[in-house]
Amino acid sequence: MQQFMIRTSHRPRPLPAGRWEMRKRWNDLLFAHWPIPANTLSPLLPEGIQIDTFQGSAWLGVAPSWTERIKLRGLPSILGVGGYPSLSLRTYVCDQHTGTTGIFVLSEDASNLIAVASARFFRHLPSHWADMRLDQKSEREFFVYSRRLFSAEPVIFMARYRGLGPTRKLAENRYGTLEYFLTERHCMFTSNRAGQLFRANIHYITWPLEDAEAVIECNDLATALGIKLPEQKPVLHYARQLAVYIWPTELVESMQGVRPVAVAVSPWG
């Protein structure tokens, strides 16, 4: 099998030790972000991590996309898990002991029941089965609709969005910009029902960000968690494709003292 090195020049640290466990690709992502007071989100975090801020604010993001090319290392394609739309509500955090920055997923909705069950069982993600579709209206224009199934209260997200094309400013994605703060995240924190903190390292090809326009017609994701969004319009970005590699999920306590080592990996087999 021919081997390739994944580009790592944009990473602030080497790739983690060991081999990635899962790979997938996100397509036609909308990133909608709102500044939120940190003390609004802090009660939703498990012990061991804290809100990371940019210009004094926490940031809450909604990210719909189309997920495909899902592969577990060493296993054949998973029967019943093809391409499907998904939707995440996220914020940005850092480890209180090591300062490692990452993503904390507050909720995740997907139309594929197998993917939802796997995310809950193996990665401790608050994943929900949803009636969901993502329709392409033109080359860079999309309509997304999601309604969470078996929910006590309606949890609906509906939006129209389009990418406006790449710009030099976004292509550079420099340290100190909001775009860098939102995208240069190389681990994902989760917690189980007992409140234990888990972490999975992640790697992706450089974010191909574009400016975006969007009309969000309904957004119950934050309200379902008791979060009130500000009246101001969100900061919007679009990404056409993003290849993602995920390392095994581990208890944070067991990871103290582990030194990351750069390794070779195979992007698409």
Image: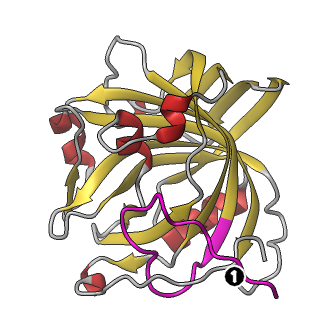
**Quick one: label 1, few (<14), some, or many (20+) residues within 10 Å?**
some
Q: Residue at x 58, y 78 (%)?
A: 20
Residue drawn where x is 33% and y is 45% of the image: 175
The answer to whether residue 29 is above or below residue 18 is: above
The answer to whether residue 80 is left or right of residue 175 is: right
Q: Nearer the viewer, residue 253 or 269?
A: 269
Spot occupied by residue 163 in the image (x, y as percentages of width and height):
66, 25
Tell me residue 130's x, y (percent). Answer: 66, 42
**Range of magenta residues:** 1-23
Tell me the residue that label 1 is attached to. 73
| In magenta segment, residue 2 | yes
Q: Please name the residue shown 53% across and 84% down the image.
A: 263
Instruction: Give the quadrant of residue 69.
Output: bottom right
In the rendered structure, the answer to whether residue 159 lies left or right of residue 185 reads right
Q: Is residue 24 above or below residue 236?
A: below
Residue 34 magenta: no
Assign the C terminus to one quadrant of the image. Answer: bottom right
Q: Is residue 113 left or right of residue 11?
A: right
Residue drawn at (24%, 40%), measured in percent from left and top?
Answer: 41
Q: Quadrant of the N terminus?
A: bottom right
Using the rendered view, name the quadrant where residue 29 is placed.
top right
